[in-house]
Structure formats: C-alpha cells, structure tokens
Amino acid sequence: MSKIGVIPIQVPTSVQVTIVKDKVNIKGKEGELHFDLPRVLELNQQGDKLILQAKNEGLPAGRQGKKTKSVHGLYRQLIFNAVKGVETLWSKKLEVIGTGFNVKMQGEDIILKLGYSHPVVFKKTDNIKFQVEGNNKIAVLGFDKQLVGQVAYQIKMLKKPDIYKGKGIRYLGEVIKLKPGKKVKAAAGSSA
C-alpha cells in the first residue's frame, strides 16, 4: 500500500470531478484536465473526497506490487495537482540577471534581451499566462503543473546562468555556485 496514494484528496465545491470507468475529468474555474487511470487503480468519490485505491491490494509484495505502489502514489499526486490547479493557478517565477538583460510583455508574448544581437521572442503557449514584474522577473502561470514547469524550464534554457558571473535566467531564489576566475586563481597561487 502506497503511503501517499492512500491519502484522500479534498475536492473544493467549485471543482467538478467526473469519473467514467478509468477516465477522470476535473473541471474548475481556471480550466479542465483529463486523466486515463492505469488498470491497476480505481478512483471513487465519497462526498467531497476522492479516494484512489489499488485493485490488487491482496497481492504479495513482489515486482508487480512495487510497481503498483509507485503508480498509486504518482497518480494520487497528479490528481491532487489537477484539483488544486483548476481551483488556483500554479506558478513558477524566474528572474533575469545581468547588465542590460531585461524582459517585457508584447501582447501575450514576452520579449527578452539577453545579450544576443537580437531580442528573443518567447511565444504564448496554450493554457499558460505570463506576467512580468519590473523589468527582470517573469511569472509563468497555468492550471497544469507539469506544463508550467516545462515552459519555465524552456524560458530558463534561453540563457543558462554563466558559471563565472551568474548572468542569465534562473528560478527566483535559486542559488548558483560561481567558479573563481583566472585572477582569483592566480592570486591564490602566488601567495602560497
């Protein structure tokens, strides 16, 4: 039995959950998500709670049992994230660091100046919203947690942080260990 999989999922009143055999539809004010459950799992709604159960609870713990436990916990968390996301949007924040580096909105797209000879245009993705705070912070918002993380990562990869100065795009609050430059190494070597 999965420790995470057995935790019931609280469903807010504004979220509708429809279960037809192994198909789950979760609809809220922010959007709608669909899931196909694996054959080994069964989802039941009891009042305002969703309970995910493994169909083969009685099987001995073996290779198939471990796989069922991991799938049980995974799908419980995916359904929980969907229920939470259609109620309140998921968010990932990025910051652009560097002299002359900035970001601004143009319609629903974002324009990034990252030290290249041209500005980089990142087009709007379906079910994703962008917000720009100041001229160096980007918020990626959406009801699908996985898609929010994927789009935030794609933006980050436009200009990975430099290992010597730290210039580039990073997650808000991310700490990057900087390498010492040649001057620091040379000074340390001559004093020894």
Image: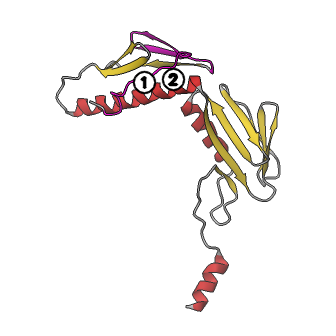
Between discs 2 and 1, the one toward the N terminus: 1
Under tag 2, what secondary structure? helix
Quarter the N terminus occupies: top left
Over which residues does the magenta segment extend? Answer: 3-30
CA separation in Å, label 2 and label 1: 8 Å
Does any portion of residue 158 appear in the rendered image?
Answer: no
User: Where does residue 192 sit, x and y in percent of width and height?
Assistant: 55, 91
Residue that numbered label 1 is attached to: 9
Question: How many neighbours does mark 2 have within 10 angstroms: few (below 14), some (14-19), or many (20 or more)?
Answer: many
Does any portion of residue 117 appear in the rendered image?
Answer: yes
Under tag 1, what secondary structure? strand
**Quadrant position of residue 139:** top right
x 79%, y 47%: residue: 135
Question: How many neighbours does mark 1 have within 10 angstroms: few (below 14), some (14-19), or many (20 or more)?
Answer: many
Q: Nearer the viewer, residue 9 or 104?
A: 9
Residue that numbered label 2 is attached to: 83
**Quadrant position of residue 62:** top left
User: Where does residue 123 sit, x and y in percent of width and height?
Assistant: 74, 33
Q: Is residue 34 above or below residue 90?
A: above
Q: Nearer the viewer, residue 17 or 103?
A: 17
x 62%, y 18%: residue: 29
Left or right, residue 80 beside residue 119: left
Outermost top residue: 20
